[in-house]
Image: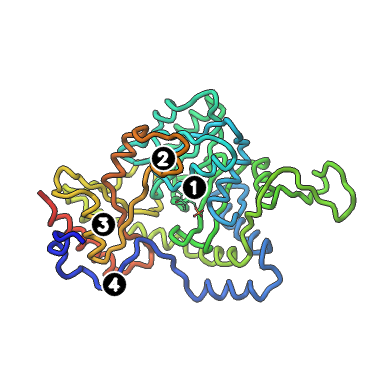
């Protein structure tokens, strides 16, 4: 325990711990799930189809394919894009490990492009620098809910014949030039993990306008099996099905989809609530010269999965770790998004070197994620603000 902290701390701003993110389950959700449990289908039934339709319609895409989780969905997209051994896929290091892992699952090689120091999203010029003859796809990540500069990424993809798989785990409901994320890239992934905008416990989905990708995703989700008799290589009878390539059991249950439908009904209201909280944070934190608040591209409207402050360490007497621990002592559930993917021992072990993305590495030293979720009360929000002010001013030079 750090002695200085005890002095900085005194009486904590709040008595009980406020998490950085939390789901919101109400009686409607519980009713929907129970109704499904009493019905005929526990897996791949009518709720899956309905959930897929609702999400597809919402984002303006032709198709949606639900998966057991967002990572499985990304794996499906990497498969559908045809990524295989020797292929390179460009992504950002400031993301959850799943964005890069999904490439490795299919034998491909993730290549990390550095971030834009303003938006923290993948830097378009750095994507260009990383392109080789082996590059087959780009996985941009709409970090914190703010879309990437997707039009420019599409230009690069066209020039080099690359597939774009957008990791929009943070960005359900976000827009780029007024258009919802989910219908712009070749394939877009959303996650329904409990910290995300809406939850199915575990869950994910791919949206796409491309029928070929859609059919591949459906088949991949269920062992690579098809029962569509028009697609069989031979037809031995009504019972016959074929496993045509190696897929997985990545299906979402109908129970989860029922929860997803019920959660979906609240999505727009919850995004508005997130925006309100962000406005309140910005109002205070934009006046503090020790902090950089999130930057918004004028083309985008974030759906605000995360609110991240960046510390100006040169104005503080301590590093991020001490600020982080001091906020924890105030019972504020802070977090760090993310450790650069290639810092992890697995990635170091397969040959990635530190130093390859200096902007990402610098960002990592300076960021703290503050609590942000729709169920937060006004008091919760004010507690976060009080705690940040208390800790930051205490450690200001
Ligand atoms: C949550 C998340 C995922 C994966 O989602 P799961 O549903 O947890 O598998 C992928 N990428 C990013 C950026 C995420 O935040």
Residue 94, horizontal then vertical, whole percent: 39, 43
First of labels 1, 3 by sequence position: 1
Is disc 3 surrounded by few (<14), some (14 to 19) or many (20+) residues within 10 Å?
many
**Vertical comparison of 286 with 119: above or below:** below
Identify which residue is drawn at 20% across, 56% down: 284
From mark 1 to mark 3, how far is it between C-alphas?
Answer: 29 Å
Is ligand 1 within 8 Å of the beta carbon of the residue shown at mark 1? yes
Residue 98 — which label?
Answer: 1
* Quarter of the image that includes the N terminus: bottom left
From mark 2 to mark 4, how far is it between C-alphas?
Answer: 35 Å
From mark 1 to mark 2, how far is it between C-alphas?
Answer: 12 Å
Location of residue 46 by image quarter = bottom right
**Vertical comparison of 285 with 186: above or below:** below
Residue 45, horizontal then vertical, whole percent: 68, 63
Q: Nearer the viewer, mark 2 or mark 4?
A: 2
First of labels 2, 4 by sequence position: 4
Report the side of 265 relative to 297 (left or right): right
First of labels 1, 2 by sequence position: 1
Identify which residue is drawn at 54% across, 44% down: 102
Location of residue 239 by image quarter = bottom right
From mark 1 to mark 4, how far is it between C-alphas?
Answer: 32 Å
First of labels 1, 4 by sequence position: 4
Location of residue 149 by image quarter = top left
Residue 281 — which label?
Answer: 3
Q: Nearer the viewer, mark 1 or mark 2?
A: 2
**Vertical comparison of 234 with 192: above or below:** above
Q: Could you tell me which secondary element the residue under label 4 belongs to? A: loop
Q: Could you tell me which secondary element the residue under label 1 belongs to? A: helix
Identify which residue is drawn at 52% across, 25% down: 159
Give the residue at mark 4. 16
Give the residue at mark 2. 342
């Amino acid at each position: 325990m750090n002695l200085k902290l005890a002095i900085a701390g005194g009486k904590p701003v709040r008595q009980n711990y406020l998490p950085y993110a939390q789901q919101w389950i109400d009686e409607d959700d519980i009713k929907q799930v129970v109704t499904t449990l009493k019905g005929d289908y526990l897996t791949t039934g009518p709720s899956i189809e309905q959930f897929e339709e609702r999400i597809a319609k919402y984002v303006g895409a032709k198709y949606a394919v639900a998966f057991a989780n967002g990572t499985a969905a990304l794996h499906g997209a990497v498969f559908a894009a045809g990524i295989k051994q020797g292929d390179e896929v460009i992504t950002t290091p400031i993301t959850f490990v799943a964005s890069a892992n999904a490439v490795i699952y299919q034998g491909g090689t993730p290549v990390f492009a550095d971030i834009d120091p303003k938006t923290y999203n993948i830097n378009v010029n750095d994507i260009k620098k990383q392109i080789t003859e082996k590059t087959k796809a780009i996985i941009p990540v709409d970090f914190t809910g703010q879309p990437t500069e997707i039009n420019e990424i599409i230009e690069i993809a066209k020039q080099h014949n690359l597939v774009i798989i957008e990791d929009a785990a943070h960005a359900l409901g976000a827009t780029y030039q007024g258009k919802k994320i989910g219908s712009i890239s070749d394939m877009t992934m959303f996650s329904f993990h409990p910290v995300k905008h809406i939850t199915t416990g575990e869950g994910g989905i791919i949206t796409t306008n491309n029928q070929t990708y859609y059919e591949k995703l459906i088949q991949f989700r269920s062992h690579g099996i098809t029962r569509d008799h028009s697609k069989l290589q031979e037809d031995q009878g009504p019972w016959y099905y074929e496993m045509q390539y190696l897929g997985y059991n990545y299906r979402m249950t109908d129970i989860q989809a029922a929860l997803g439908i019920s959660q979906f009904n609240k999505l727009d209201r919850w995004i508005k609530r997130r925006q309100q909280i962000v406005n309140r944070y910005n109002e205070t934190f934009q006046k503090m010269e020790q902090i950089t608040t999130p930057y918004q591209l004028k083309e985008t409207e974030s759906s605000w999965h995360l609110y991240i402050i960046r510390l100006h360490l040169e104005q503080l007497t301590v590093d991020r770790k001490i600020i982080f621990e001091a906020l924890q002592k105030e019972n504020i559930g802070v977090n760090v998004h993310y450790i650069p993917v290639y810092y992890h021992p697995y990635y170091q072990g397969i040959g990635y070197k530190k130093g390859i993305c200096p902007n990402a590495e610098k960002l990592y030293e300076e960021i703290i994620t503050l609590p942000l979720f729709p169920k937060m009360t006004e008091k919760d929000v004010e507690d976060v603000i009080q705690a940040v002010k208390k800790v930051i001013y205490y450690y200001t030079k």
